[in-house]
Image (cartoon, helix red, strand yellow):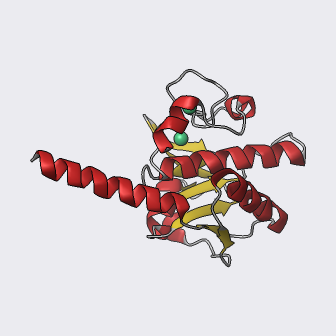
Amino acid sequence: MKTCLIYGLILFTTIVSAQRKAPIYIQPLGKVNTTTIHKVKKSMELFYHRSCEIKPMVNFTPDILADSKTRYEAGNILRKFSSNKNVLIITEKDIATAKGNIKEWGVFGFGYRPGSTCVISTYRLKRKVVNAQFIDRLNKVAIHEIGHNIGLPHCTSGNKHCLMNDAGGTIAQVDNEQILFCNKCNSLIK
Ligand SMILES: [Zn+2]
Ligand SMILES: [Zn+2]
């Protein structure tokens, strides 16, 4: 039993560490500003030291709509685009997921932990801000969601500047973060 557990851990560690070096595929879902996509690509390459490839745009389909039909369901998107490659989906449309009693809680991003698929939305990040701040927010959310894919949970160190804090739908939290993982989060990926 113990041996089995150890082999299981070794296998998991091998998969996760292989993923940390694998390319990230950026998948635009619907029309997404080209400059925005390239900024995210550069940010991912700088932060994770992984190559990024931009995939051709794919169109929205009714099966990924949320029940209200006014936004898209983040879980549906992940399931639809689930892949053995690390895919970062980016969309300009609003995305939501169930949270407690709220069926459609609008989110900035959503990703499997661990896993290979995540999605980020520009929709809630660009309100009332200049472009530079919007891009800063988007890069932070992208790094956070890929962080989940490589196995990181939400930050528990108390360092509010760490990118792995749960934003909880609050843009002020994202703005308060810096482009870094705290020592505790960093120790989990090394
Ligand atoms: Zn942290
Ligand atoms: Zn998160």
Nearest the camera: 150 or 14? 14
Indicate left or right for 81 with 27 as reference. left
Q: Which residue sits furthest top?
A: 158
- Across and down, in percent, residue 189 comes to 49, 44
Residue 72: x and y in percent read 57, 58
Q: Identify the residue shown where x is 52% and y is 55%.
A: 74
- Residue 101 pos. (x, y %): 43, 35
Considering every residue shown, the one lying at the far bottom of the view is 56
Q: Residue at x 43, y 49 (%)?
A: 113
Residue toward you, 57 or 10: 10
Ligand 1 quadrant assignment: top right
Instruction: Using the image as rendered, state which of residue 185 and residue 108 is in the foreground.
Output: 185
Image-quadrant location for residue 178: top right
Residue 31 visible to an observer of this rendering = yes
Q: Residue at x 60, y 31 (%)?
A: 182
- 51 above or below 107? below
Look at 88% across and 48% down and name the residue there: 131
